Image (cartoon, rainbow, N blue to C red):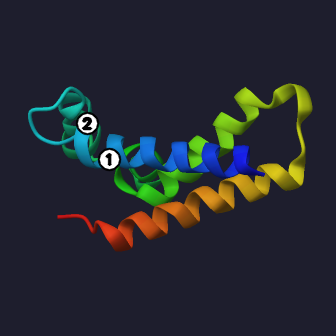
Amino acid sequence: MFEIILFSLLCTCAAWVLKNILTAPGMILWPLYNLIINKWKAADWIAKPTFECIYCMSGQWALWGYLAVYYDCYNGMIHILTITTSIAFAYVIQILHPDE
């Protein structure tokens, strides 16, 4: 159980860093963010899970990360729990550190 909580927290922290730090102006992923979000005016179904929404990003990272890491011992209920826990951690992080 501790491993699932730690994995969920890792997915959420990685999504938060990507959203709030790496895509800030002047940072390494700013050109990609600027291209997709500002120049191409990407639809919400592309923009939210890639750069815009911390809940969507952490859920996506948990969804695909769990499949990649635990493919040999897959458990559907644990998978859903991992995604849900990751989104809950994103909610807590947004409360503790709201977007500027």
| Element on which disc 1 rests | helix
Query: In the displayed structure, does residue 84 sit left or right of residue 77?
Result: left
| Residue 73 screen position, x and y as percent | 90, 32
Q: Which residue is drawn at 37% across and 74% down?
A: 95
**Are the two marked residues, 1 and 2, in contact with CB atoms closer than 8 angstroms?**
yes
Inspect this view and state whether residue 42 appears: no
Q: Which numbered dot is residue 19?
A: 1
Quarter of the image for the C terminus: give it. Answer: bottom left
Q: Which residue is drawn at 19% across and 38% down?
A: 34
Query: In the displayed structure, does residue 94 sit left or right of residue 61?
Result: left
Q: Which amino acid does label 2 sit on?
A: Leu
> For residue 17, which quarter of the picture?
top left
Along the line of sight, the residue nearer the viewer: 96 or 84: 96
Characterize the local packing of mark 2: few (<14), some (14-19) or many (20 or more) Cα atoms within 10 angstroms: some
Along the line of sight, the residue nearer the viewer: 55 or 98: 98
Q: Residue at x 27, y 69 (%)?
A: 98
Relative height, residue 74 to residue 8 (above, below): above
Q: Residue at x 19, y 45 (%)?
A: 38
Q: What residue type is labelled 1?
A: Lys
Q: Residue farthest to the front?
A: 2
Q: Which numbered dot is residue 28?
A: none
| Residue 29 screen position, x and y as percent | 25, 30
Instruction: Determine which residue is flagged by label 2.
Output: 22
Q: Residue farthest to the bottom?
A: 95
Relative height, residue 51 to residue 31 (above, below): below
Query: In the displayed structure, does residue 8 sit left or right of residue 23?
Result: right
> For residue 37, which quarter of the picture?
top left
